[in-house]
Amino acid sequence: MRIGITCYPSYGGSGVVGTELGMELARRGHSVHFICYDAPFRLDRTQTNVFYHEVNVPNYPLFKHPPYLLALTAKMLETARYQSLDLLHVHYAIPHASSACLARDIIGGGLKVVTTLHGTDITLVASDPSFRDVVAHAINESDGVTAVSENLRQETLRSFPISTDLVTIPNFVDPGVWVRRPDPASRARFAPEGEKILIHVSNFRPVKQAGMVVRILAGVNRRLPGRLLMVGDGPDVGLAREVARELGVDDRVHFLGRQEQVVEILSQADLFLLPSERESFGLAALEAMACSVPVVASRTGGLPEVVVEGEAGYLLDPQDLAGMVEAAVAVLADPPTHARMAEAARRVAVTRFPTEKIVPLYEAFYRQVMR
Ligand code: GMT
């Protein structure tokens, strides 16, 4: 098939999923054309069957806001025409699905649109009443729509006037890439012998509760010595630093910023923390699990579909700080419990969410949409 993929190229789960999916489809022989305003950060542009088409947004003194939606539509149209695309697969409804539907309507038949909903496009952005009908229209006008968890599928059906089928296709992880590679020298750089390593990876948006992550570390530290690695960047890094200073644990929290080699860092960690207010799936938790890192997270959104409770970790109410501290200590303080959960985390990740099982679901879905 000849497939156009649009996703946000910056750090964020939906961009990662769109990019990894496109590269895997290319490995499977499809021609994959990325249509984005920048090259996605995980994209290998030298890979066979992978092409990149940059969206150039015109600027003119009259425009207070550059017309991204229309620039994207124009690039989709051009790419679909000259590369004879069969379908456009857009990740994140806003505004990608609207652009794709418009491009298809201009072409007038043949081209299909598949939209994948990732979460905040539905739960946060689209809950603004003025966006609601626009997003619902883009979903209803798509030729096929997927959601990354059953919870997100249900929530979309509850919150929007949807007249089309939504199919759940979960996110995935490559078990050969995301695998624990212990390295005592690297571990020693983060924590002295005998101390536990907790880790959080995110874009530090308010929904991730980065301050709460630091509070959990402080609570754990009252019971056993531990360090916290904060990987990623975003608006709440400053807040998390402030909480660390207030609680007197700033020398125990390492802000590592954006990292390319996340597997290496996860491989040294003992516990992953994700106390988000909402999380439609929790790709970062899945990647940690694949690296045999148990998870303490919020019981919210799609997380219960990923982190099997009591096996791969523990889930608590997003505001239950004491409960999260207790759960973290329960995993960290007892080596047999930790070993059992680390093993289960890896097993769940590689048996339920491996690339080789999930990507064929997208291929089958494309075939169904094309029919
Ligand atoms: O987490 C974010 O704020 C970014 C967002 C995105 O679209 O990049 O992530 C969403 O999509 C990911 C990939 O499907 C999911 O793993 C995340 O759970 C989801 N984030 C939220 O629902 C908050």
Image (cartoon, rainbow, N blue to C red):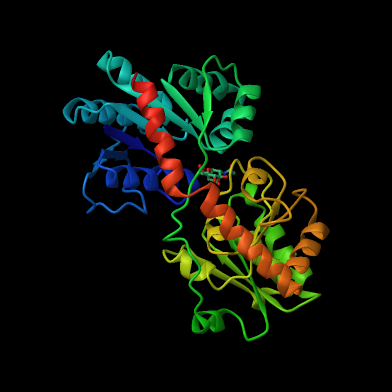
Where is 104 relative to 268, above or below? Answer: above
Where is 169 relative to 189, above or below? Answer: above
Where ligand 1 lies, by quadrant? top right
* Residue pictured at 51% horizontal, 76% vertical: 182
* Residue pictured at 64% horizontal, 29% vertical: 155
Is residue 178 at all visible to an observer of this figure? yes
Point out the image quarter for the C terminus. Answer: top left
Horizontally, residue 122 falls left or right of residue 69, namely: right
Residue 147, image x, y percentages: 53, 33
Is residue 203 at all visible to an observer of this figure? no
Residue 72, image x, y percentages: 32, 31
* Residue pictured at 44% horizontal, 23% vertical: 144
Q: Between 327 and 228, which is closer to the camera in this rendering? A: 327
Where is 105 relative to 21, above or below? Answer: above
Horizontally, residue 7 falls left or right of residue 26, namely: right
User: Where on the picture, by quarter, is residue 190?
Assistant: bottom right
Residue 230, image x, y percentages: 58, 65
Residue 352, image x, y percentages: 54, 47
Point out the image quarter for the N terminus. Answer: top left
* Residue pictured at 63% horizontal, 51% vertical: 208
Count all numbered tags in the image, as a single digit: 0
User: Where on the picture, by quarter, is residue 310?
Assistant: bottom right
Where is 75 relative to 237, above or below? Answer: above
Q: Between 226 and 211, which is closer to the camera in this rendering? A: 226
